[in-house]
């Protein structure tokens, strides 16, 4: 049998859980915005380096690093999160250290 005190405690716990959930969503959204900005900047850096240091089109660059043209396009637009393995291939093809991709 539930007492009024137990019902109030459960209601308070439910409110607290909802508050925590909303706070986590807000934090995720802030991190997501920062994450998206970093991906866009990384993509711009890769594109700039590709255009300045090679004559590769996105298609030819994709062949060089074993990624599709669509994957290269999405990386350069900041629409996808490239793996470390992909970034290593990209930096090698651009003749730069992987850390140079993040100097922004």
Image (spheres, rainbow, N blue to C red):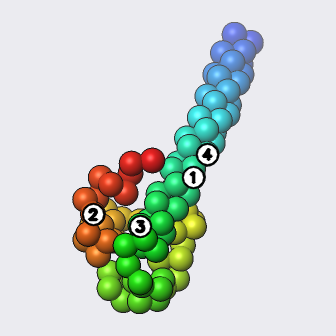
- Tell me whether the residue at label 3 lies in contact with that at label 2, contact meaning CB atoms closer than 8 angstroms: yes
Q: CA distance from mark 3 to mark 2?
A: 9 Å
- Tell me whether the residue at label 4 lies in contact with that at label 1, contact meaning CB atoms closer than 8 angstroms: yes
Vertical comparison of 30 with 84: above or below: above
Q: CA distance from mark 4 to mark 2?
A: 28 Å
Of badges 3 and 4, the one in the foreground is 3
Q: Position of residue 25 (x, y in %)?
A: 63, 39
Vertical comparison of 46 with 17: above or below: below
Which disc, if any, is residue 33?
A: 4
Q: CA distance from mark 4 to mark 1?
A: 5 Å
Q: Residues within 10 Å of mark 4 (few under 14, many from 20)?
A: few
Q: Position of residue 53 (x, y in %)?
A: 37, 73
Which residue carries the number 3 mark?
Answer: 49
Q: Residues within 10 Å of mark 2 (few under 14, many from 20)?
A: some
x 28%, y 58%: residue: 98
Q: CA distance from mark 3 to mark 4?
A: 24 Å
Mark earlier in primary sequence (3, 4): 4
Mark earlier in primary sequence (4, 2): 4
Which residue carries the number 1 mark?
Answer: 36
- Tell me whether the residue at label 3 lies in contact with that at label 4, contact meaning CB atoms closer than 8 angstroms: no
Q: Residues within 10 Å of mark 3 (few under 14, many from 20)?
A: some
Mark earlier in primary sequence (1, 2): 1
Q: CA distance from mark 1 to mark 3?
A: 20 Å
Which disc, if any, is residue 96?
A: 2
- Tell me whether the residue at label 1 lies in contact with that at label 2, contact meaning CB atoms closer than 8 angstroms: no
Q: Position of residue 16 (x, y in %)?
A: 65, 23
């Amino acid at each position: 049998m539930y007492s009024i005190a137990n019902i109030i405690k459960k209601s308070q716990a439910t409110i607290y859980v909802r508050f925590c959930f909303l706070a986590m969503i807000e934090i995720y959204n802030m991190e997501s915005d920062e994450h998206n900005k970093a991906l866009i900047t990384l993509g711009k850096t890769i594109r700039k380096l590709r255009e300045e240091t090679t004559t590769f089109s996105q298609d030819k660059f994709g062949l060089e690093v074993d990624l599709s043209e669509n994957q290269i396009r999405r990386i350069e637009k900041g629409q996808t999160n490239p793996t470390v393995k992909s970034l290593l291939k990209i930096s090698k093809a651009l003749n730069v250290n992987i850390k140079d991709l993040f100097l922004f």
